[in-house]
Amino acid sequence: MSQSVNTLLRLRELILNGEVRPGERVSELSVSDRIGASRTPVRAALMRLADEGLLESLPGGGFAVRSFTERDIRDAIEVRGTLEGLTARIAAEHGVAEGTLADLRDTIARIDDLLGDDRGVEATFAEYVVLNEQFHTLLAEAADSPILAQSLGRAAALPFASPSGFLQAQSVLPEARLILTLAQEQHRAVVEAIANREGARAEALMREHARLARRNLELALRDRTILQHIPGGALIRRRQRT
């Protein structure tokens, strides 16, 4: 792994783990000293994380760690869902190669096997996250649109907006299997709509699928212990509830 990639991953990890707090100023020098990297890859990492939205530029130079309101997160999820819906519609209307459809169906079959595993949700959850991300990656590829794929990648760059952003909130819930089963049925319905060239249906299903993340957000915000399972949970400004 190159020093640039390692620096980016390390700095992102510090932010998402709450080791660098919201509002805290970060500069090339402070980060370089903290993680033991030279300033050139640190500068690139800071700019990349600002582009992703985890950092914001300060008027006097340097950056500060951003915090996010519940509305910020809902809006980010909605943008990602809108773009995924468009992706599904374009894939359906333009047609998808049989190999890509086979890969999508294979991923769904592997998730079926995982949900039927008698080890339980918590034991298999990490594998589910990988397969879920694979499904969404294949969907992005199915539209065969580099511009749309790039826009979707940017929309999902924030940890809260990604398809797996709030999945970990589910792993500790008693209704976890029910939610994952619902998500899996949506996966299956989207792929069949794409295969049948039903663009409007594929788009509506995919947008509804993305809204599961909003439900998971609400579950996470109800319970601070659940929020601790969310990467970047420390960056969320929770609304005071009465």
Image (cartoon, rainbow, N blue to C red):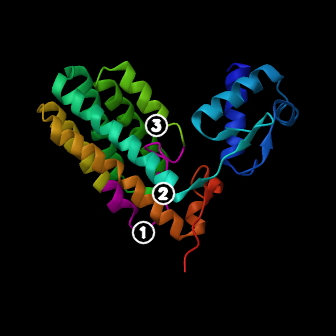
Q: Secondary structure at mark 2?
A: helix
> Looking at the rendered structure, which numbered label has been put on residue 174?
1
Q: Amino acid at mark 3?
A: Ala
- Between residue 227 and residue 110, name the one nearer to us: 227
Q: Which residue is mark 2?
A: 122
In the picture, measured across the screen, residue 186 lies left or right of residue 54, that is: left
Q: Is 129 situated above or below 6?
A: below
The secondary structure type at the circle numbered 3 is helix
The location of residue 159, given as percent across then percent down, is 54, 44
Residue at image coords 70%, 23%: 44
Q: Secondary structure at mark 1?
A: loop
User: Can you identify the residue that label 3 sits on?
Assistant: 155
Which amino acid is tagged 1? Pro
| Quadrant in which the N terminus is drawn | top right
In which quadrant of the rendered image does the C terminus lie? bottom right
Tell me which amino acid carries mark 2.
Answer: Glu
The stretch in magenta equals 159-181
Q: Residues within 10 Å of mark 2 (few under 14, many from 20)?
A: some
Asked if residue 180 lies in the magenta stretch, the reply is yes
Q: Residue furthest bottom?
A: 242
